[in-house]
Amino acid sequence: MVDVSDEEYVIFVARKLLSLTYPWARDGVGFTIPDAWLFRDLLSREKLAPENIEWMRRALLKYERQIRQLGLDFDRLEKVRIAQRAIFWRAEGLEGKKATSFLIWLRGDKGGIRVTLRDYSRRRRDVLMYAMTRAEVVDFVKKHFGVDLSNVENFNITVKRPDEFFRRVSLLHHLF
């Protein structure tokens, strides 16, 4: 393979796995059904932010066996860091959107945030997803909720109808 930037390599690996994906076949060759939809959505965009590419890179780490079987450099995916934060952001913008759910999760040394936004004028739902390290989740929850999760192994909380919470702490602006 010709020398390409790290961003281009992550996108190449994602496209390669997506091209081999038949999620209903469950053959262990490509992506799972949920990941196939997420990668298809991201890769259909004309332009990706570095945070989007970092989200793809982190998600690709689950597919070590498939990537190695294709003869691709999995170690390069492990070592490179595209952006400080990993964001799956399908939303076009926040104007006119209402937050319908807010999920914070922590599993071992990984965690994240998922915000579902609804645009009722267009009958569309958008999803913002942030992959975070354990330390980032612990700091975020301590700062915004006043709860110390440093000794907790697994954590999952969903806030339904979080608009009042977002207004109170201007949380969406902290996330961007």
Image (cartoon, helix red, strand yellow):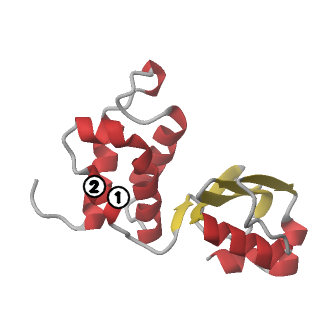
Quick one: label 1, few (<14), some, or many (20+) residues within 10 Å? few
Residue at numbered disc 2: 75
Q: Tell whether 154 sits left or right of 133.
A: right
Left or right for 50, reference 152: left
Within the image, what quadrant is residue 120 found in? bottom right
Extreme left residue here?
2
Quarter location, residue 90: bottom right
- Amino acid type at image mark 2: Asp
The residue under the point 76% across, 65% down is 149
Quarter occupied by the C terminus = bottom right
Whether residue 76 is situated above or below residue 5 in the rendered picture: above
Tell me which residue sits at (63%, 60%) in the image.
112
**As rendered, which of 144 and 166 lies closer to the eye?**
144
Rendered view: 25 above or below 75: above
Q: Quick one: SS at disc 2?
A: helix
| Marks 2 and 1 in Cβ contact (< 8 Å) | yes
Tell me what residue is drawn at x 85 percent, y 75 percent. Answer: 146
In the rendered view, does 70 fall on the left or right side of 52?
A: left
Residue 38: in sight, yes or no? yes
The disc at residue 78 is 1
Numbered marks: total: 2
Compared with 39, 27 (above or below) is above
Q: Crowding near pointer 2: few (<14 within 10 Å), some, many (20+)?
A: few
